[in-house]
Image (cartoon, coloured by chain):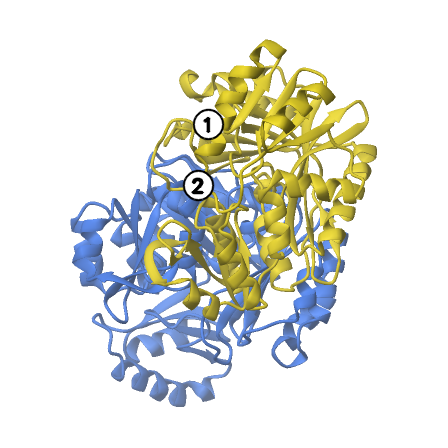
Chain colours: A yellow, B blue
Amino acid sequence: MNVLVLGSGQLAQMMALATKPLNIELRAYDVGSKQVINPLAQDQVFGDLASGIEYADFITAEFEHIEHDVLTLCEASGKLRPTSQSIKTGGDRRLEKQLLAQCQADNAQHIIVEDEQSFNAALKELQLPIILKSALAGYDGKGQWRLKSLDQAPSTWLEIADFFAGSTSEIPQGLVAEQMVPFDREVSLVGMRSATGEIKVYPLTENHHTDGVLSVSLALENEEKLQATALEVFTRLTNTLDYVGTLAIEFFQVGDKLLVNEIAPRVHNSGHWTQQGADTSQFENHIRAVCGLPLGGTELLRPTAMINILGEDSVENDILAIAGVAVHWYGKSKRPGRKMGHINVSANTQEQLQQKLVAVAALLPESAFSDIKAYISNLEC
Amino acid sequence: MNVLVLGSGQLAQMMALATKPLNIELRAYDVGSKQVINPLAQDQVFGDLASGIEYADFITAEFEHIEHDVLTLCEASGKLRPTSQSIKTGGDRRLEKQLLAQCQADNAQHIIVEDEQSFNAALKELQLPIILKSALAGYDGKGQWRLKSLDQAPSTWLEIADFFAGSTSEIPQGLVAEQMVPFDREVSLVGMRSATGEIKVYPLTENHHTDGVLSVSLALENEEKLQATALEVFTRLTNTLDYVGTLAIEFFQVGDKLLVNEIAPRVHNSGHWTQQGADTSQFENHIRAVCGLPLGGTELLRPTAMINILGEDSVENDILAIAGVAVHWYGKSKRPGRKMGHINVSANTQEQLQQKLVAVAALLPESAFSDIKAYISNLEC
C-alpha cells in the first residue's frame, strides 16, 4: 500500500517509521519545495505533487495549514482522508467554532473579529480578560493577543490591523476573540475514526505548556467520567465531519466540564506517548484508518508520560540508562524553542513514573528545561 | 552517529527502524551487490564498502557468514563491533565448539569431521543417532545429515564428500558430528554486552521449529533457575569473546540442564518479540551497545510471543483487529519457506496470550501454517 502525506516533518516521519513494518510505503509532500520526498531518507526526491497523487493509494496530512488548491487536487483524486473540509476546519478557527456550534460542543464564549467594528463588538460582548487568536495558522502561541484591560484596546487593535495587512494567506485572515476561561487544567483526547465509522480513543492526556508550546503530556488513569464526556464530544465531531484518521481535541477542564479549546485533524504532539504507552501508536493507527485497516488497541498499557525536547539537539546519554525511557529525535537542525524531539517515560506504577520523570528531569539542562523541571517536581502522578 | 551494518536484510532494516529515533543513521552493506545501501530505502545506493567504512562511526553485522576479507577491512578501521573473531566463531561450528570448550559450557558430545577418517572416528566414538552439521553456513536445516543406523554410513559419507567437494567457501568446509540429544525443549537467550562489560539479557524464550526453521517463540516467565544458568553461560561466552552487541545462545533443555546448541553473534529471530515485549528491543539495544550508549530495559513487560510468517506475503487484515498484535513485514519477495515477516502477540496474562495466539492462528491459512497452528493449539502458556 502506498500513502502520500501532505507535509514532511516529524509527524510524517513517525508515521513512516510506524507503518513500514505493515509494508506500507509512505512518501511525503514537502510544501516548501513542492517536492515529494521519502520521509525516512529526506534526500530521496520523487517528483512533484501530481506524481505523488498518482503514486498513492491514499493521501493524508500531517498538518492543517495546507494550501487549498493542494487539498482540492488531492480530494479530486478520491484518495484524501480525512476530507479537505476536515483539514480546513482544523486550520481556521472560524470554521472550527462553526463545527463546535453545530455539534453543541461546549467551548469558551467568543466573537469572530475581522475588522475594527467586530473588534469593538467583542470588547462589548465578552468579559475581560479576552484572548484574541488568529483564525489561520499561528499555532503554538503565535498570532495571539491577550487583553486584560480596555486601556490596551487601541494599541492592540493597531497591532491586529498590522497583522491583517501583513497576511499572505489566500483567504482573509481574521481572529477569534475568546473570553479567557479560568480552567483547572488542559487535557486532550486523541482518537481515530475508521472509514466504516468505528471509533477508538486513547486515554485523556494532561498537558503542560511552556511559552505556549506543549512541553509535557501525561496519560491519565481513572478518569472514567471525564473520558466518557470527551469520547462523546469526539464522536459527535468526527461523525459530523465523516472523519477518517486520527483527530485530537484539546480541552480546558473546568471542574467536571470540558470546554473544547481546539481540534487538530491529525496526529498530535499530546499523543506521542502512545508510541510506548499503547498497543498501537497514534501514528500507526492513523495510517491504519486511512488505509481501511482495522484499528489497533488504544488502552493505556502502563503509566506513561512524554517530555518535549524544545530547542536542544542532544541530551545526556544517561537518560537512556533509565529503563522505560525512549528518546525520539526528529533529525532537525537546532533553533531556539523548536520541537527537536521527545522523551517517552513509562513505568509500572504512577509512583514509579513520577520517580522516573524526576530522574529524567534531573539530567536535563536547566537552561532549556527550567519550566519542565519545575512542573515535574510538582507532579503527583 | 553513523553505523554501517554488514548485511542488508530484515535484521538491518529493523535495526534502522529502531534507531532512527536516536538520530543514528544506518547504512547496510549488501554482500551480494557489494554496495552500501539505505536499509529503509533500498534503492538508495551510496557506494562501495570502502566508502561505507569511511562513513561509519561504528560497524556491525546482521549475520555471521561474511567473507573474511570484508571482516579484515572493517576490523582494520577500528570500528567493528563485535570483533571479527566473534563473528567468525558464529559462522564456523568448529570455532564455536572450541569456544564452548574454553568456557566449559555444556553441549552435546561431538567430533569434528573433515575427512573419511574423522567421519569413521565419529561413528565409533559417538552413540547413534548422530547429527552431522556443516561447519560453515548452512543454517536453518541445510547442510545437515542424520544418521540413525550404521547401514546409512557409506551413502551418507558419499553425500558429505560431494558436499565438501562442492564447497565454494574460502576456508575448508567441515562438519561437526554430534550425538543427538533427547531434549525436553529448545530455548534461547538473547542479551547484550556493552563495551564497558555491562551485560543485560532478556528472559529466556521457548522456541518451536518447523522444518528446521524457527516458527514460534514464547518469552518465558518464572524460570529463575534456568534463567540464571543461561545468564552464567552468556556471561562466560561474551566475556571470553570481549563481545560488544547482541548475542543469542540457543540451548537444548534437558531437565534443568542447558546444553548449548549454537550461538549467533547478532540479533536473533527468537528475540523479535522484544519489539513489543520489552522496554528496549534487541535491535535498539544492539546498536546502543555498538555505539557505546547505555543499554535499555530488557525485562518482560507482559506475556509476549512471536509467530514467524514463512513463505506468505499477506495475512488476513482481521489479525490487526486483535489488540496486542503487531505485524512486521520485511518487504521481501515471496518464496516457499522464506522468512517474510513475523507477528508479535502480547497480552496482560498468559491465559489471555494463549487465547490471542489461538485467535491469530485461526486466521492463518492452513497451507503454510499447519504446523504452527498445531503447536499453538497445544500450548499451555
N-term mark: 2 or 1 = 1
Q: Residue furthest right?
A: A225
Q: Quadrant of residue A296?
A: bottom right
**Residue occupying image coordinates x 51% and y 51%:** B189
Q: Amino acid at mark 2?
A: Thr
Within-10-Å neighbours for mark 2: few <14, some 14–19, many 20+? few
Q: Secondary structure at mark 2?
A: loop
Q: Do callouts 2 and 1 point to residues on the same chain?
A: yes
Label drawn at residue A168: 2
Relative to A309, residue B381 above or below: below
Query: Residue B379's x, y, as percent?
Result: 71, 62
Q: How many marks?
A: 2
Name the residue at 41% across, 74% down.
B132
Residue appearing at x 62%, y 25% in the figure: A119
B124 versus B29 height, above or below: below
Q: On what subunit does the disc labeled 2 rest?
A: A
Q: Nearer the viewer, residue A290 or B40?
A: A290
Position in image of residue B294 (x %, y %): 41, 34
Q: Secondary structure at mark 1?
A: helix
Tell me whether circle 2 and circle 1 mark residues in contact (CB < 8 Å): no
Q: Chain of mark 1?
A: A
Q: Residues within 10 Å of mark 1 (few under 14, many from 20)?
A: few
Inter-mark Cα distance, 2 to 1: 12 Å
Q: Is residue B350 visible?
A: no
Q: Which residue is mark 1?
A: A162
Residue at position x 16%, y 50% in the image = B76
Determine the image quadrant of residue A358: top right
